[in-house]
Amino acid sequence: MLKIYNTSAREKQVFTPIVHGKVSMYVCGMTVYDYCHLGHARVMVVFDMVSRWLRASGYDVTYVRNITDIDDKIIKRANENNETIAQLTQRFIEAMNEDAARLGVIRPDIEPKATEFVQGMIEMINALIEKGFAYRADNGDVFYSVNHFPGYGKLSGKSLEDLRAGERVEVDTFKKDPMDFVLWKAAKPGEPSWNSPFGGPNSGKGRPGWHIECSAMSSHHLGHHFDIHGGGQDLQFPHHENEIAQSEAAHSHDGKPCKMVNYWMHNGFVRVDDEKMSKSLGNFFTIRTVLEKYDAEVVRFFILRAHYRSPLNYSDQHLDDAKSALTRLYTALRGHEVVDLTIDWQHPQAARFRDAMNDDFNTPEAIAVLFDLANEINKSKALTSVRLLKNLAGILGLLERSPEEFLQGDAAHVFAGEALDIDALIQARLSAKKNKDFAQADAIRKQLAAAGIVLEDSPQGTTWRRA
């Protein structure tokens, strides 16, 4: 029985889909004006993991992740680069997809772009105006009136008074309340714009605000009421709070809000050496920068080794530890080929894995099961453990290469200025032992140990792993 920590309820709740056997999930995606960073990597990997587990559990999943391809940052960057918005966004959409693929992220079922749904946003804004939840300002903008939505603040757990006192709100003389937020921005010279029925100084021409796009796209693809909405913790307020206000008010009937989402999921922040990642602190890393130094599967393993709601602390030491740990798992599979992809869920280790994943996607515990299986393989070479390790890890998008393919990147190590051929040295050591030249055999073991390679002898032969 799957339980999910529901941000809106602030507790774990048993997951019950709206439609039996089906799951509808929407995740806030990237604003494509630059390369994706580690925070984006976490969102992509976490909800890829969620989608994979839901499907492995037998659900028919419709996973939607949007692309924001129009906003202030995009317009500014395109102008700076002297290129069109379409050229800029397409370039970074392609880069995003390349980064995601390297991290083993399966493409969402639907990836709508904001610019493709402007008409739907206009229709939703118009409905909000007609129902009294939004108003036209004298400057041509349209604002949402938070005072007219009784449930505003329920996701963050704060009242409007608390929010007014605790949040820095941009001063706008055209707003009726400082907490009101923009739904439609009147056209400015040199900016892209669309026709609308909202009137104003520019005859209604303008572009949508950021928050309204997700309300329009999620309702179009998943309906007015769907199962799961996800995103980073930083989006909880104001973005997701505003989505709720927009969607539930626009789809209200007889003055009663229509519930938007049953389960809200938010992954934790990424920190760098225990400090918040930010460009101002100089500790900002793009996915591409990290992948220049570390294998993409190591980065995926590093992300999944932490619970999705916990802070994720990035450092070279933690990535090095993740690399060593993943190497141990791959090493356990050396010499074994798995062709049977079925999983016996009655097996105690498989049941542990299932229970961990059903406990709010507890990947740290699920990965602990993988290491227990690796230990069993190293002790007994049990084929059942081999098959379980390979197949359970595959659910998490791990161990999907052959051990040889993963380990070959570690097959050459620098020692005293020379590249070591590990397999050749192992053979040389075996020959030395066969000739009773134990001093030479011991010297080779020490040479490899100095390079961080541990040899493990067994009746089946000699294997190696990273220290």
Image (spheres, rainbow, N blue to C red):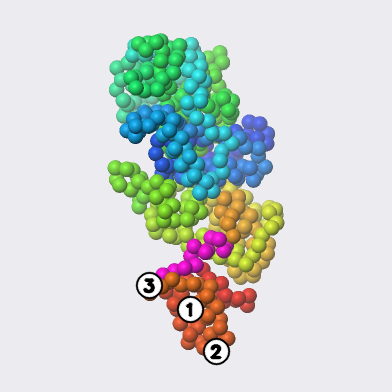
Q: In the rendering, at what x and y percent does residue 350 appear? A: 64, 55
How many angstroms separate mark 1 from mark 2 (CA)?
A: 15 Å
Give the residue at x 51% y 87%. 438
Residue type, numbered disc 1: Arg
Residue 351 on the magenta span:
no
**Is residue 412 magenta-colored?**
yes
On the image, numbered disc 3 is attached to which residue? Answer: 417
Q: Earlier in the sequence, mark 3 or mark 1?
A: 3
Judging from the image, what secondary structure is the residue with disc 1 in? helix
Percent of width and height locating residue 11: 51, 39
Q: Which portion, as a residue range, is magenta?
A: 403-414
Q: Which mark is residue 436?
A: 2
Q: Residues within 10 Å of mark 3 (few under 14, many from 20)?
A: few
User: What kind of element bears circle 2?
Assistant: loop
N-term-proximal mark, 1 vs 2: 2
Residue at figure coordinates x 34%, y 19% from the top left:
188
- Would you identify the image quadrant in which residue 374 lies? bottom right
